[in-house]
Image (cartoon, helix red, strand yellow):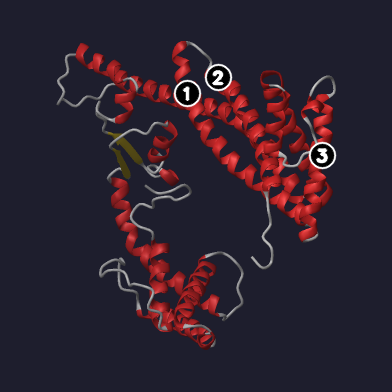
């Protein structure tokens, strides 16, 4: 099937044949081995001596114009460059672009026109025979899910005002009928008492087929809409994650330290919320010390009002001490390590989150069978997972920063 913008010329394409004839002749004159001559009998006729002379002159001019470049390239690179130059020359010659008189482009155009006219004259009777036979007849052996694609296939016939026709041969075992509407058509055939091996052409069947294709198109349109709604949920999270990541990646030293401080404070709040009421001050302090070693805090500080404020202050003091420790090894090491750890955790957790969201999408689709809106399920579960990812991000980053011990130069 020809692609978009390509017409099938009845009887043959003399312009293309002439261009291929010149390409073969020019390549031979320039000593290029990358052009394979067409098989014998491909061209509609042998060109006249006058046209052959024009081709020879143009080919010699091309070979002469390209000879100077041969010494500058390696063999393989030279071959590619020469073929590219040849194709460009023929493209200019075949176009209506202005060229200098007696230039290689001008001579190539004259040769192309001479050969093309002879080929066109030879192909004219063949085109007439095709027209008298009814033009191009396109045969389809299956239907596409989209009527637009079938329309493109039908459109290959009857181009440029030429006659043409199309004919589709279908089977109830084709995919489109097995998945959509096959039972309806089979019921129609049973009603009409038509055997399985008997061909059928009917306007009623054609209408049912068109209705089936329309049904398929509606199905895929609704599916694309659902996929778009699913992707919108993840797109919001993606934009937020990328924005946060870019801030860490391009942020100044103070901004990176502020990010670390926010992660440390958030982690401290998470620990207090999960442990203080349930396990008491001693257990909470032990948990804080796992994340923030040498934090200047006692169990008594975690009792009574203001426990969270005292914990935050102690954690920030521990963070400043850790940053000073790293900077004493090498100035700026605290910012470098904090930036690296935050980016690494963001990338790792985001990849895991996207994988989890894929599982949620499958789960949400199954919930539709129970009458639950799958988009709402996906949105709610996706939000819960994203919040869990943010919690893991701040906790992992804070823990990794306080556990980081740079190697000494002698190690």
The answer to whether mark 2 and mark 1 are in CB contact below 8 A is yes
Seen from the viewer's position, the closer of residues 55 and 167 is 167
Callout 1 crowding tier (Cα within 10 Å): few <14, some 14–19, many ≥20: some
Real-space Cα distance between discs 2 and 1? 9 Å
Label 1: which secondary element:
helix
> Under tag 2, what secondary structure?
helix
The answer to whether the residue labelled 1 contacts the one labelled 3, judged by CB atoms less than 8 Å apart, is no
Instruction: Judge whether 167 appears above or below 88 on screen.
Output: above
User: Disc 3 and disc 2: Cα gap in Å?
Assistant: 39 Å
The percent coordinates of residue 181 (x first, y second) are 33, 20
Disc with the residue nearer the chain's start (3 vs 2):
3
Q: Which mark is residue 145?
A: none
Which percent across, then down, holds residue 292?
Answer: 72, 40
Residue ID at (33%, 60%): 123
Q: Going 75% across and 37% down the picture, which residue do you hit? A: 264
Q: Which residue is disc 3 drawn over?
A: 316
Residue 214 x/y as whole percent: 42, 23
Say which residue label 2 marks.
377
Residue occupying image coordinates x 71% and y 27%: 282
Which residue in the structure is indicated by mark 1?
363
Q: Quadrant of residue 259?
A: top right
Q: Is residue 297 left or right of residue 140?
A: right
Q: Give SS at disc 3.
A: helix
Tell me: residue 310, above or below residue 338.
above
Q: Nearer the viewer, residue 336 or 279?
A: 279
Sequence-first tag of 1 and 3: 3
Q: Nearer the viewer, residue 367 or 335?
A: 335
Q: Residue at x 79, y 37 (%)?
A: 315
Q: How many marks?
A: 3
């Amino acid at each position: 099937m020809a692609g978009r913008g390509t017409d099938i010329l009845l009887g043959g394409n003399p312009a293309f044949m002439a261009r291929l004839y010149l390409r073969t002749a020019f390549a031979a004159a320039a000593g290029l081995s990358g052009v394979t001559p067409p098989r014998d009998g491909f061209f509609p006729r042998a060109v006249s001596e006058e046209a052959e002379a024009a081709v020879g002159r143009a080919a010699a001019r091309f070979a002469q114009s390209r000879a100077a470049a041969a010494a500058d390239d390696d063999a393989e690179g030279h071959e590619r460059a020469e073929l590219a130059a040849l194709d460009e020359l023929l493209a200019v010659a075949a176009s209506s672009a202005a060229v200098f008189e007696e230039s290689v482009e001008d001579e190539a155009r004259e040769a192309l026109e001479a050969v093309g006219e002879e080929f066109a004259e030879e192909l004219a009777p063949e085109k007439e025979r095709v027209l008298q036979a009814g033009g191009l007849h396109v045969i389809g052996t299956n239907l596409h899910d989209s009527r637009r694609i079938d329309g493109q296939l039908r459109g290959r016939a009857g181009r440029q005002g030429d006659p043409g026709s199309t004919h589709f041969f279908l089977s109830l075992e084709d995919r489109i009928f097995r998945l959509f509407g096959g039972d309806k058509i089979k019921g129609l055939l049973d009603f009409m008492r038509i055997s399985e091996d008997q061909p059928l052409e009917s306007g009623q069947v054609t209408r049912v087929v068109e209705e089936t294709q329309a049904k398929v198109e509606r199905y895929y349109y609704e599916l694309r809409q659902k996929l778009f709604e699913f992707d919108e949920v993840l797109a919001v999270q993606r934009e937020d994650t990328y924005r946060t990541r870019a801030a860490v990646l391009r942020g100044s030293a103070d901004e990176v330290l502020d990010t670390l401080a926010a992660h440390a404070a958030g982690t401290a709040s998470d620990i207090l919320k999960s442990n203080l009421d349930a396990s008491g001050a001693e257990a909470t302090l032990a948990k804080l010390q796992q994340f923030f070693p040498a934090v200047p805090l006692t169990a008594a500080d975690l009792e009574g009002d203001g426990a969270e404020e005292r914990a935050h202050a102690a954690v920030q003091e521990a963070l400043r001490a850790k940053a000073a420790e790293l900077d004493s090894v090498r100035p700026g090491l605290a910012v470098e390590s904090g930036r690296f750890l935050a980016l690494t955790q963001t990338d790792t957790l985001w990849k895991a989150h996207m994988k989890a969201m894929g599982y949620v999408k499958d789960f949400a689709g199954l919930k539709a069978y129970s009458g639950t809106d799958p988009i709402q399920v996906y949105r709610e579960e996706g939000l819960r997972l994203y919040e869990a990812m943010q919690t893991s991000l701040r906790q992992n980053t804070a823990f990794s920063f306080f556990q980081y011990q740079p190697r000494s130069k002698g190690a």
